[in-house]
Amino acid sequence: MSIESILSDISSFVWGPIMLALLLGVGVFLSIALKFMPWRYLVGAFRQLWKGRKTEDGTGQITPFQALMTSLSATIGTGNIAGVATAIAIGGPGAIFWMWVTAAFGMATKYAEAVLAVHYRETDALNQQVGGPMYYIRNGLGSSWAWLGFLFALFGMLAAFGIGNTIQSNSVAHAVHNSFGIDNQVTGLIMAALAGLVIIGGIKRIAEVAQFLVPIMGITYVIGGLLIIGMNLSEVPSILVIIIDHAFTGTAATGGFAGATIWMAIRFGVARGVFSNEAGLGSAPIAHAAAKTDDPVRQGTIAMLGTFIDTLVICTITALVILLSGTWTSGETGAALSSNAFASLIPGGNWIVSVGLIIFAFTTILGWSYYGERCAEYLLGTRIIIPYRLVWIIAIFLGAIAAGENQHIKLLWLAADTFNGLMALPNLIALILLSPVVFKLTRHWFAGQTQ
Protein backbone atom coordinates (compact mmCIF):
# COMPACT_ATOMS: atom_id res chain seq x y z
CA MET A 1 0.00 0.00 0.00
CA SER A 2 1.41 3.43 -0.98
CA ILE A 3 1.97 6.33 1.40
CA GLU A 4 -0.65 8.29 -0.51
CA SER A 5 -3.32 5.63 -0.05
CA ILE A 6 -2.48 5.27 3.65
CA LEU A 7 -2.72 9.03 4.21
CA SER A 8 -5.89 9.17 2.16
CA ASP A 9 -7.51 6.46 4.29
CA ILE A 10 -6.46 8.16 7.54
CA SER A 11 -7.60 11.57 6.30
CA SER A 12 -10.97 10.15 5.22
CA PHE A 13 -11.45 8.61 8.67
CA VAL A 14 -10.27 11.70 10.58
CA TRP A 15 -12.51 13.97 8.52
CA GLY A 16 -15.42 11.58 8.60
CA PRO A 17 -18.88 12.16 10.08
CA ILE A 18 -17.60 12.17 13.68
CA MET A 19 -15.16 15.02 13.08
CA LEU A 20 -17.67 17.06 11.10
CA ALA A 21 -20.26 16.55 13.82
CA LEU A 22 -17.75 17.63 16.47
CA LEU A 23 -16.54 20.72 14.61
CA LEU A 24 -19.98 21.96 13.69
CA GLY A 25 -21.61 20.64 16.86
CA VAL A 26 -19.20 22.37 19.23
CA GLY A 27 -19.57 25.63 17.30
CA VAL A 28 -23.37 25.39 17.31
CA PHE A 29 -23.43 24.45 21.02
CA LEU A 30 -21.18 27.36 22.01
CA SER A 31 -23.06 29.82 19.78
CA ILE A 32 -26.42 28.90 21.29
CA ALA A 33 -25.12 28.83 24.86
CA LEU A 34 -23.53 32.25 24.33
CA LYS A 35 -26.85 33.46 22.90
CA PHE A 36 -25.10 34.14 19.58
CA MET A 37 -22.92 36.78 21.22
CA PRO A 38 -20.18 36.47 18.52
CA TRP A 39 -22.72 37.60 15.90
CA ARG A 40 -24.41 40.23 18.07
CA TYR A 41 -21.14 41.72 19.33
CA LEU A 42 -19.33 41.85 15.98
CA VAL A 43 -19.19 45.66 15.83
CA GLY A 44 -18.20 45.79 19.49
CA ALA A 45 -15.39 43.33 18.78
CA PHE A 46 -13.96 45.67 16.14
CA ARG A 47 -14.07 48.46 18.73
CA GLN A 48 -12.10 46.26 21.15
CA LEU A 49 -9.59 45.55 18.40
CA TRP A 50 -9.12 49.27 17.78
CA LYS A 51 -8.55 49.86 21.50
CA GLY A 52 -6.07 47.00 21.56
CA ARG A 53 -3.66 48.59 19.07
CA LYS A 54 -1.55 50.19 21.78
CA THR A 55 -2.74 48.55 24.98
CA GLU A 56 0.20 47.85 27.28
CA ASP A 57 -1.62 46.82 30.47
CA GLY A 58 -1.53 43.25 31.69
CA THR A 59 1.09 40.56 31.35
CA GLY A 60 2.20 39.30 27.95
CA GLN A 61 4.67 40.02 25.18
CA ILE A 62 2.54 41.60 22.43
CA THR A 63 -0.49 43.91 22.18
CA PRO A 64 -4.00 42.48 21.67
CA PHE A 65 -3.93 43.86 18.11
CA GLN A 66 -0.58 42.18 17.41
CA ALA A 67 -1.97 38.92 18.79
CA LEU A 68 -4.79 38.99 16.23
CA MET A 69 -2.40 39.94 13.42
CA THR A 70 -0.11 37.07 14.42
CA SER A 71 -3.12 34.76 14.44
CA LEU A 72 -4.22 36.07 11.04
CA SER A 73 -0.68 35.75 9.71
CA ALA A 74 -0.98 32.04 10.42
CA THR A 75 -4.52 31.63 9.06
CA ILE A 76 -4.46 33.87 5.98
CA GLY A 77 -2.37 31.70 3.70
CA THR A 78 -2.73 29.13 0.97
CA GLY A 79 -6.08 28.10 2.45
CA ASN A 80 -7.57 31.40 1.26
CA ILE A 81 -6.31 30.98 -2.29
CA ALA A 82 -5.35 27.38 -3.05
CA GLY A 83 -7.59 25.82 -0.37
CA VAL A 84 -10.76 27.55 -1.55
CA ALA A 85 -10.00 26.56 -5.14
CA THR A 86 -9.41 22.95 -4.10
CA ALA A 87 -12.69 22.87 -2.18
CA ILE A 88 -14.59 24.06 -5.25
CA ALA A 89 -12.69 21.80 -7.67
CA ILE A 90 -13.36 18.68 -5.61
CA GLY A 91 -16.54 19.49 -3.68
CA GLY A 92 -18.22 21.79 -6.17
CA PRO A 93 -19.66 25.28 -5.49
CA GLY A 94 -21.71 23.86 -2.60
CA ALA A 95 -18.50 23.47 -0.58
CA ILE A 96 -18.45 27.25 -0.15
CA PHE A 97 -21.80 27.20 1.68
CA TRP A 98 -20.45 24.67 4.17
CA MET A 99 -17.31 26.74 4.51
CA TRP A 100 -19.54 29.68 5.50
CA VAL A 101 -21.47 27.56 8.00
CA THR A 102 -18.23 26.33 9.56
CA ALA A 103 -16.96 29.91 9.89
CA ALA A 104 -20.23 31.37 11.23
CA PHE A 105 -20.32 28.93 14.13
CA GLY A 106 -16.52 28.79 14.27
CA MET A 107 -16.49 32.36 15.60
CA ALA A 108 -17.86 31.07 18.91
CA THR A 109 -15.27 28.29 18.91
CA LYS A 110 -12.42 30.74 18.32
CA TYR A 111 -13.80 33.02 21.03
CA ALA A 112 -13.91 30.20 23.59
CA GLU A 113 -10.40 29.06 22.68
CA ALA A 114 -8.90 32.50 23.29
CA VAL A 115 -10.83 33.02 26.54
CA LEU A 116 -9.49 29.76 27.94
CA ALA A 117 -5.97 30.39 26.60
CA VAL A 118 -5.62 33.70 28.44
CA HIS A 119 -7.41 32.44 31.57
CA TYR A 120 -5.20 29.37 32.01
CA ARG A 121 -1.87 30.60 30.58
CA GLU A 122 1.44 30.19 32.41
CA THR A 123 4.83 31.89 32.69
CA ASP A 124 7.64 29.68 31.36
CA ALA A 125 11.32 29.43 32.33
CA LEU A 126 12.14 32.32 29.97
CA ASN A 127 9.54 34.53 31.70
CA GLN A 128 7.21 34.42 28.70
CA GLN A 129 3.43 34.05 28.83
CA VAL A 130 2.57 30.74 27.16
CA GLY A 131 -0.82 29.16 26.64
CA GLY A 132 -3.10 27.23 24.36
CA PRO A 133 -5.11 23.99 24.47
CA MET A 134 -2.33 21.96 26.09
CA TYR A 135 -2.25 24.41 28.99
CA TYR A 136 -5.98 24.88 29.44
CA ILE A 137 -6.42 21.12 29.29
CA ARG A 138 -3.83 20.55 32.02
CA ASN A 139 -4.68 23.56 34.19
CA GLY A 140 -8.42 23.54 33.61
CA LEU A 141 -9.21 19.82 33.61
CA GLY A 142 -6.50 18.68 36.01
CA SER A 143 -3.56 16.29 35.90
CA SER A 144 -5.76 13.30 35.07
CA TRP A 145 -6.36 14.90 31.67
CA ALA A 146 -2.70 15.78 31.05
CA TRP A 147 -2.46 12.99 28.46
CA LEU A 148 -4.97 14.87 26.30
CA GLY A 149 -2.84 18.00 26.46
CA PHE A 150 0.19 15.90 25.52
CA LEU A 151 -1.62 14.58 22.45
CA PHE A 152 -2.61 18.06 21.33
CA ALA A 153 0.96 19.32 21.66
CA LEU A 154 2.30 16.31 19.77
CA PHE A 155 -0.21 16.61 16.93
CA GLY A 156 0.23 20.39 16.87
CA MET A 157 4.00 20.15 16.60
CA LEU A 158 3.69 17.71 13.68
CA ALA A 159 0.81 19.55 12.00
CA ALA A 160 2.85 22.75 12.01
CA PHE A 161 5.28 21.30 9.49
CA GLY A 162 2.41 20.56 7.11
CA ILE A 163 -0.21 23.29 7.38
CA GLY A 164 2.25 25.98 8.45
CA ASN A 165 5.47 25.18 6.67
CA THR A 166 5.92 22.82 3.71
CA ILE A 167 2.45 23.47 2.24
CA GLN A 168 3.16 27.19 2.33
CA SER A 169 6.70 27.13 0.93
CA ASN A 170 5.55 24.65 -1.70
CA SER A 171 2.84 27.02 -2.89
CA VAL A 172 5.14 30.06 -2.86
CA ALA A 173 7.88 28.34 -4.89
CA HIS A 174 5.31 27.13 -7.41
CA ALA A 175 3.81 30.64 -7.76
CA VAL A 176 7.22 32.34 -8.06
CA HIS A 177 8.39 29.84 -10.66
CA ASN A 178 5.25 30.33 -12.76
CA SER A 179 5.26 34.12 -12.47
CA PHE A 180 8.96 34.96 -12.56
CA GLY A 181 10.69 31.79 -13.77
CA ILE A 182 12.83 31.63 -10.63
CA ASP A 183 14.17 28.20 -9.67
CA ASN A 184 12.49 26.53 -6.68
CA GLN A 185 15.79 26.10 -4.86
CA VAL A 186 16.53 29.83 -5.05
CA THR A 187 13.05 30.66 -3.75
CA GLY A 188 13.45 28.11 -0.96
CA LEU A 189 16.79 29.55 0.15
CA ILE A 190 15.49 33.13 0.15
CA MET A 191 12.34 32.18 2.07
CA ALA A 192 14.29 30.16 4.62
CA ALA A 193 16.75 33.02 5.15
CA LEU A 194 14.07 35.70 5.53
CA ALA A 195 11.98 33.53 7.84
CA GLY A 196 15.05 32.76 9.92
CA LEU A 197 15.78 36.45 10.43
CA VAL A 198 12.27 36.97 11.81
CA ILE A 199 11.84 33.74 13.77
CA ILE A 200 15.10 34.20 15.66
CA GLY A 201 13.56 37.26 17.34
CA GLY A 202 10.70 35.23 18.79
CA ILE A 203 7.07 36.26 19.16
CA LYS A 204 7.79 40.00 19.44
CA ARG A 205 9.52 40.16 16.07
CA ILE A 206 6.95 37.86 14.46
CA ALA A 207 4.17 40.13 15.75
CA GLU A 208 5.93 43.27 14.49
CA VAL A 209 6.24 41.82 10.98
CA ALA A 210 2.68 40.46 11.08
CA GLN A 211 1.10 43.78 12.11
CA PHE A 212 2.81 45.40 9.10
CA LEU A 213 2.34 42.78 6.35
CA VAL A 214 -1.06 41.30 7.18
CA PRO A 215 -3.16 44.50 7.00
CA ILE A 216 -1.40 45.77 3.86
CA MET A 217 -1.67 42.55 1.87
CA GLY A 218 -5.10 41.67 3.23
CA ILE A 219 -6.59 45.03 2.25
CA THR A 220 -4.88 44.92 -1.18
CA TYR A 221 -6.26 41.45 -1.91
CA VAL A 222 -9.75 42.40 -0.75
CA ILE A 223 -9.79 45.56 -2.88
CA GLY A 224 -8.63 43.61 -5.95
CA GLY A 225 -11.27 40.95 -5.42
CA LEU A 226 -14.06 43.45 -4.75
CA LEU A 227 -13.11 45.33 -7.91
CA ILE A 228 -13.63 42.17 -9.97
CA ILE A 229 -16.89 41.34 -8.16
CA GLY A 230 -18.12 44.90 -8.66
CA MET A 231 -17.44 44.66 -12.39
CA ASN A 232 -19.62 41.53 -12.52
CA LEU A 233 -22.13 42.49 -9.84
CA SER A 234 -25.19 41.55 -11.90
CA GLU A 235 -24.03 37.91 -11.96
CA VAL A 236 -23.42 37.62 -8.21
CA PRO A 237 -27.02 36.74 -7.23
CA SER A 238 -27.08 33.79 -9.63
CA ILE A 239 -23.71 32.62 -8.27
CA LEU A 240 -25.07 32.72 -4.72
CA VAL A 241 -28.06 30.64 -5.83
CA ILE A 242 -25.69 28.07 -7.38
CA ILE A 243 -23.67 27.86 -4.15
CA ILE A 244 -26.74 27.24 -1.98
CA ASP A 245 -28.38 24.88 -4.47
CA HIS A 246 -25.27 22.74 -4.90
CA ALA A 247 -24.74 22.60 -1.13
CA PHE A 248 -27.85 20.41 -0.86
CA THR A 249 -28.03 18.71 -4.26
CA GLY A 250 -24.41 18.07 -5.22
CA THR A 251 -22.84 19.06 -8.51
CA ALA A 252 -23.38 17.45 -11.90
CA ALA A 253 -20.33 16.68 -14.04
CA THR A 254 -19.56 19.44 -16.53
CA GLY A 255 -16.50 19.92 -18.71
CA GLY A 256 -13.32 18.87 -16.93
CA PHE A 257 -15.14 18.72 -13.62
CA ALA A 258 -15.78 15.20 -12.35
CA GLY A 259 -18.90 15.99 -10.35
CA ALA A 260 -19.34 16.07 -6.59
CA THR A 261 -21.78 14.57 -4.13
CA ILE A 262 -23.37 16.43 -1.23
CA TRP A 263 -21.00 14.61 1.12
CA MET A 264 -17.96 15.82 -0.85
CA ALA A 265 -19.27 19.38 -0.70
CA ILE A 266 -19.72 19.15 3.08
CA ARG A 267 -16.43 17.36 3.70
CA PHE A 268 -14.23 19.66 1.64
CA GLY A 269 -16.16 22.78 2.62
CA VAL A 270 -15.64 22.06 6.32
CA ALA A 271 -12.08 20.74 5.94
CA ARG A 272 -10.87 23.66 3.84
CA GLY A 273 -12.78 26.10 6.03
CA VAL A 274 -11.00 24.78 9.11
CA PHE A 275 -7.69 24.68 7.22
CA SER A 276 -8.18 28.35 6.43
CA ASN A 277 -9.54 29.86 9.68
CA GLU A 278 -8.33 27.15 12.11
CA ALA A 279 -11.41 27.48 14.35
CA GLY A 280 -11.44 24.33 16.48
CA LEU A 281 -7.84 23.38 15.76
CA GLY A 282 -6.59 25.19 18.86
CA SER A 283 -3.71 26.92 17.09
CA ALA A 284 -4.85 30.57 17.25
CA PRO A 285 -5.24 30.70 21.07
CA ILE A 286 -1.50 29.99 21.33
CA ALA A 287 -0.90 33.47 19.86
CA HIS A 288 -3.65 35.15 21.89
CA ALA A 289 -2.17 33.73 25.10
CA ALA A 290 0.85 36.02 24.52
CA ALA A 291 -1.29 39.20 24.46
CA LYS A 292 -0.72 41.98 26.99
CA THR A 293 -4.06 41.63 28.72
CA ASP A 294 -5.51 40.30 31.94
CA ASP A 295 -9.01 40.16 30.46
CA PRO A 296 -9.74 36.79 28.79
CA VAL A 297 -13.16 37.80 27.43
CA ARG A 298 -11.92 41.00 25.82
CA GLN A 299 -9.18 39.07 24.06
CA GLY A 300 -11.73 36.43 23.08
CA THR A 301 -13.88 39.01 21.30
CA ILE A 302 -10.82 40.16 19.37
CA ALA A 303 -9.84 36.58 18.55
CA MET A 304 -13.20 35.69 17.01
CA LEU A 305 -12.65 38.40 14.37
CA GLY A 306 -9.95 36.19 12.90
CA THR A 307 -12.53 33.68 11.65
CA PHE A 308 -14.79 36.42 10.31
CA ILE A 309 -12.01 38.18 8.39
CA ASP A 310 -10.31 35.04 7.13
CA THR A 311 -13.24 33.00 5.85
CA LEU A 312 -16.35 35.15 5.62
CA VAL A 313 -14.44 37.97 3.90
CA ILE A 314 -11.24 36.80 2.17
CA CYS A 315 -12.23 33.21 1.30
CA THR A 316 -15.62 34.41 0.07
CA ILE A 317 -13.97 36.89 -2.28
CA THR A 318 -11.74 34.16 -3.72
CA ALA A 319 -14.70 31.82 -4.16
CA LEU A 320 -16.89 34.42 -5.90
CA VAL A 321 -14.13 35.33 -8.34
CA ILE A 322 -13.54 31.66 -9.21
CA LEU A 323 -17.24 31.00 -9.78
CA LEU A 324 -17.79 34.24 -11.69
CA SER A 325 -14.96 33.31 -14.05
CA GLY A 326 -16.41 29.89 -14.85
CA THR A 327 -12.92 28.35 -14.68
CA TRP A 328 -13.89 25.97 -11.87
CA THR A 329 -14.91 23.37 -14.47
CA SER A 330 -11.56 23.56 -16.28
CA GLY A 331 -9.94 20.67 -14.42
CA GLU A 332 -7.43 22.96 -12.70
CA THR A 333 -7.18 23.05 -8.93
CA GLY A 334 -5.28 24.85 -6.17
CA ALA A 335 -3.54 28.18 -6.69
CA ALA A 336 -3.49 27.70 -10.47
CA LEU A 337 -7.30 27.73 -10.55
CA SER A 338 -7.47 30.93 -8.49
CA SER A 339 -4.81 32.58 -10.65
CA ASN A 340 -6.61 31.66 -13.88
CA ALA A 341 -9.90 32.95 -12.48
CA PHE A 342 -8.50 36.36 -11.53
CA ALA A 343 -6.58 36.64 -14.82
CA SER A 344 -9.69 35.87 -16.88
CA LEU A 345 -11.70 38.69 -15.31
CA ILE A 346 -9.17 41.51 -14.99
CA PRO A 347 -5.88 42.30 -16.77
CA GLY A 348 -3.01 41.29 -14.54
CA GLY A 349 -5.37 39.52 -12.15
CA ASN A 350 -2.91 36.66 -11.85
CA TRP A 351 -0.47 39.07 -10.19
CA ILE A 352 -2.96 39.73 -7.40
CA VAL A 353 -3.03 36.00 -6.69
CA SER A 354 0.70 35.46 -7.09
CA VAL A 355 1.80 38.34 -4.85
CA GLY A 356 -0.99 37.63 -2.37
CA LEU A 357 -0.07 33.96 -2.19
CA ILE A 358 3.62 34.73 -1.65
CA ILE A 359 3.04 37.18 1.20
CA PHE A 360 0.14 35.27 2.78
CA ALA A 361 2.12 32.03 2.76
CA PHE A 362 5.26 33.69 4.13
CA THR A 363 3.39 35.20 7.07
CA THR A 364 1.72 31.84 7.70
CA ILE A 365 5.17 30.27 7.99
CA LEU A 366 6.07 32.87 10.60
CA GLY A 367 2.87 32.45 12.63
CA TRP A 368 2.94 28.67 12.62
CA SER A 369 6.61 28.61 13.59
CA TYR A 370 5.49 30.10 16.90
CA TYR A 371 2.64 27.62 17.30
CA GLY A 372 4.85 24.63 16.63
CA GLU A 373 7.55 26.00 18.90
CA ARG A 374 5.16 26.40 21.82
CA CYS A 375 3.90 22.83 21.33
CA ALA A 376 7.48 21.56 21.24
CA GLU A 377 8.31 23.56 24.38
CA TYR A 378 5.34 22.04 26.20
CA LEU A 379 6.60 18.56 25.37
CA LEU A 380 10.37 19.02 25.76
CA GLY A 381 11.00 22.24 27.64
CA THR A 382 12.67 25.49 26.61
CA ARG A 383 15.86 23.69 25.52
CA ILE A 384 14.10 22.56 22.34
CA ILE A 385 13.40 26.10 21.07
CA ILE A 386 16.65 26.72 19.15
CA PRO A 387 16.87 23.22 17.60
CA TYR A 388 13.20 23.45 16.62
CA ARG A 389 13.77 26.77 14.86
CA LEU A 390 16.68 25.31 12.89
CA VAL A 391 14.64 22.29 11.77
CA TRP A 392 11.78 24.63 10.88
CA ILE A 393 14.01 26.69 8.58
CA ILE A 394 15.34 23.55 6.86
CA ALA A 395 11.77 22.31 6.30
CA ILE A 396 10.92 25.56 4.50
CA PHE A 397 13.58 24.79 1.91
CA LEU A 398 12.53 21.15 1.56
CA GLY A 399 8.92 22.15 0.99
CA ALA A 400 9.96 24.65 -1.66
CA ILE A 401 12.00 22.23 -3.76
CA ALA A 402 9.05 19.82 -3.83
CA ALA A 403 6.90 22.49 -5.52
CA GLY A 404 5.59 21.73 -8.96
CA GLU A 405 5.42 17.98 -8.35
CA ASN A 406 1.72 17.10 -8.34
CA GLN A 407 2.30 13.90 -6.39
CA HIS A 408 4.20 15.75 -3.68
CA ILE A 409 1.59 18.47 -3.48
CA LYS A 410 -1.18 15.91 -3.01
CA LEU A 411 0.78 14.13 -0.28
CA LEU A 412 1.41 17.39 1.55
CA TRP A 413 -2.27 18.36 1.45
CA LEU A 414 -3.28 14.91 2.66
CA ALA A 415 -0.78 15.07 5.53
CA ALA A 416 -1.95 18.57 6.46
CA ASP A 417 -5.60 17.48 6.49
CA THR A 418 -4.78 14.45 8.63
CA PHE A 419 -2.79 16.27 11.31
CA ASN A 420 -5.33 19.12 11.37
CA GLY A 421 -8.02 16.65 12.34
CA LEU A 422 -5.87 14.87 14.90
CA MET A 423 -4.96 18.09 16.74
CA ALA A 424 -8.58 19.28 16.67
CA LEU A 425 -9.94 16.29 18.58
CA PRO A 426 -8.27 16.98 21.98
CA ASN A 427 -9.09 20.67 21.67
CA LEU A 428 -12.78 20.13 20.90
CA ILE A 429 -13.14 17.72 23.83
CA ALA A 430 -11.56 20.32 26.13
CA LEU A 431 -13.83 23.09 24.83
CA ILE A 432 -16.91 21.06 25.67
CA LEU A 433 -15.69 20.16 29.17
CA LEU A 434 -14.48 23.70 29.96
CA SER A 435 -17.42 25.52 28.37
CA PRO A 436 -18.96 26.38 31.80
CA VAL A 437 -15.83 28.42 32.55
CA VAL A 438 -16.24 30.31 29.27
CA PHE A 439 -19.91 31.02 29.99
CA LYS A 440 -19.19 32.23 33.51
CA LEU A 441 -16.37 34.57 32.45
CA THR A 442 -18.52 35.89 29.61
CA ARG A 443 -21.50 36.66 31.87
CA HIS A 444 -19.30 38.52 34.37
CA TRP A 445 -17.56 40.58 31.71
CA PHE A 446 -20.72 41.67 29.90
CA ALA A 447 -22.41 42.39 33.23
CA GLY A 448 -19.54 44.76 33.97
CA GLN A 449 -19.87 46.39 30.56
CA THR A 450 -23.51 47.30 31.21
CA GLN A 451 -22.90 48.86 34.61
Image (cartoon, rainbow, N blue to C red):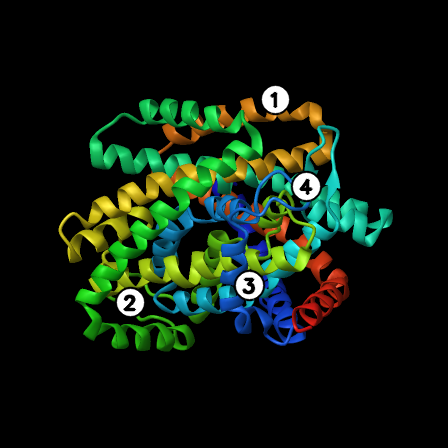
Q: Which image quarter is the C terminus in?
A: bottom right
Could you tell whether 293 is left or right of 276 in the image?
Answer: right
Residue drawn where x is 35% and y is 72% of the image: 243
Specify whether residue 167 is in view. Answer: no
Q: Secondary structure at mark 4?
A: helix
Residue drawn where x is 25% and y is 72% of the image: 236
Q: Earlier in the sequence, mark 4 or mark 2?
A: 4
Q: Earlier in the sequence, mark 3 or mark 1?
A: 3
Q: Earlier in the sequence, mark 2 or mark 1?
A: 2
The reply to whether the C-beta atoms of the residues labelled 3 and 1 are less than 8 Å apart is no
Which residue carries the number 3 mark?
106
User: Foreground mark, 4 or 2?
Assistant: 4
CA gap between label 3 and label 2 equals 31 Å
Which residue carries the number 1 mark?
387
**Residue 5: x, y in percent?**
50, 45
Picture quarter containing residue 391?
A: top right
Which residue carries the number 2 mark?
253
The reply to whether the C-beta atoms of the residues labelled 3 and 2 are less than 8 Å apart is no
CA gap between label 2 and label 1 equals 49 Å
Specify whether residue 359 is in view. Answer: yes
Picture quarter containing residue 213?
A: top left
Q: Amino acid at mark 1?
A: Pro
Q: Name the one closer to the observer, 67 or 380.
A: 67
Which residue carries the number 4 mark?
153
User: Foreground mark, 3 or 4?
Assistant: 3
Could you tell whether 183 is left or right of 277 in the image?
Answer: left
Q: Amino acid at mark 3?
A: Gly
CA gap between label 1 and label 4 equals 17 Å
Picture quarter containing residue 146?
A: top right
The reply to whether the C-beta atoms of the residues labelled 2 and 1 are less than 8 Å apart is no
Q: Amino acid at mark 2?
A: Ala
User: Foreground mark, 2 or 1?
Assistant: 1
